[in-house]
Image (tube, grey):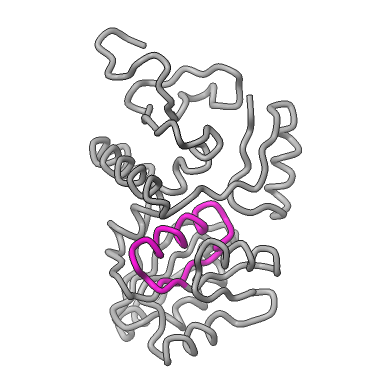
Amino acid sequence: MGEGSKLEVGQKVLATPGLPEGGLSEFVVAPEESVYVVPDSMSASEAAGMFITYQTAYYALFYRSQLQKEEVLLVHAGAGGVGSAAIQLGKAKGAKVIATAGGPEKVKVCEDLGADVVVDYNKDDFVSVVKDVTNGEGANVIFDPVGADVFDRSKKCIAFDGRLLVIGFAGGRIPEVAVNHALVKNYSIVGVHWGLFAKRNPQEVRRIHDHLMDLYHKGDFRPLIYNEYPLEDVPNALEVLGERKSYGKLIAIP
């Protein structure tokens, strides 16, 4: 630690390691502005599983969409890293959460996370389910890390004054938007770029981190961990991740 550091030797922390070295090593060096204190009650794996994903979901739901209590939140890929975070933080806010997931195992994961309704997109049409659950009104906020056809179909079940959050494009295709449709249905398409926000607002990032720690203490969320892998088994972990066999986060253990 440098002279004048606010950190103490022995504190449990999480950090974003510097590039190009990255974090897949036994020892890392990170600038202090990228280091965050976590409670002793939080395991190292939970801290690693929380970082970035929960901040992204928090920023998306509480800043960009201004999610309100009792609103309907539709979370796509609910068993994934950011999706699982969005389910838990949405419930912490008091929203009614509908999640989508592929297959019985991932549906069960979303149910265990607290989702009120879970749609297996391999069998059912989420648009129909959302309309049925909301009596035709649609979802107030849609959390979409998938893009492609999922984004296209989400526009069919968004509520008046709804907010469609663009988190990423795991589905591969970057969708295009007919803006007249947004005008007619009076909804907003809202970009979510956590990395740039964090770079421009470092003090606000610390406030978000502190609030997340408060929510963790209250039991409002627990990072979803699929498995822990020894460092030498990281290539296998990446294969599991690439084949979409996992849920939540995969953790490398030095």
> In the rendered image, which quarter is residue 33 located in?
top left
Residue 211: x %, y % from top left: 30, 46
Q: Name the residue located 70 percent from the left edge and 69 percent from the top edge.
A: 104
Residue 222 on image: x %, y %: 49, 49
Q: In this view, does 207 lie above or below 123?
A: above
Residue 147, how many percent across, how many down?
Answer: 52, 64
135 with respect to 210 (left or right):
right
Task: Work out whether residue 6 or residue 186 is closer to the camera in this orientation and state it.
Answer: 6
- Expressed as whole percent of the image width and height from the top left, the position of residue 105 reads 70, 64
In the image, 183 versus 44, the foreground residue is 44
Answer with left or right where residue 8 lies relative to residue 131: left
Q: Which of 111 and 229 is in front in this view?
A: 111
User: Which residue is drawn at the image coordinates 32% and 75% (left, top)?
Assistant: 70
Give the quarter of the figure containing the C terminus: top right
**The N terminus appears in which quarter of the rendering?**
top left
Q: As rendered, which of 12 and 57 lies closer to the eye?
A: 12
Q: How many numbered discs?
A: 0
Q: Is residue 96 magenta?
A: yes
Res. 96 image quadrant: bottom left
The residue range painted magenta reads 73-97
Let me know if residue 101 is in the magenta part. Answer: no
Left or right: where 128 falls relative to 70:
right
100 w.r.t. 197: above or below: below
Rendered position, 227 above or below 107: above
Residue under the point 30% across and 58% down: 62
**Residue at image x 31%, y 37%?**
199
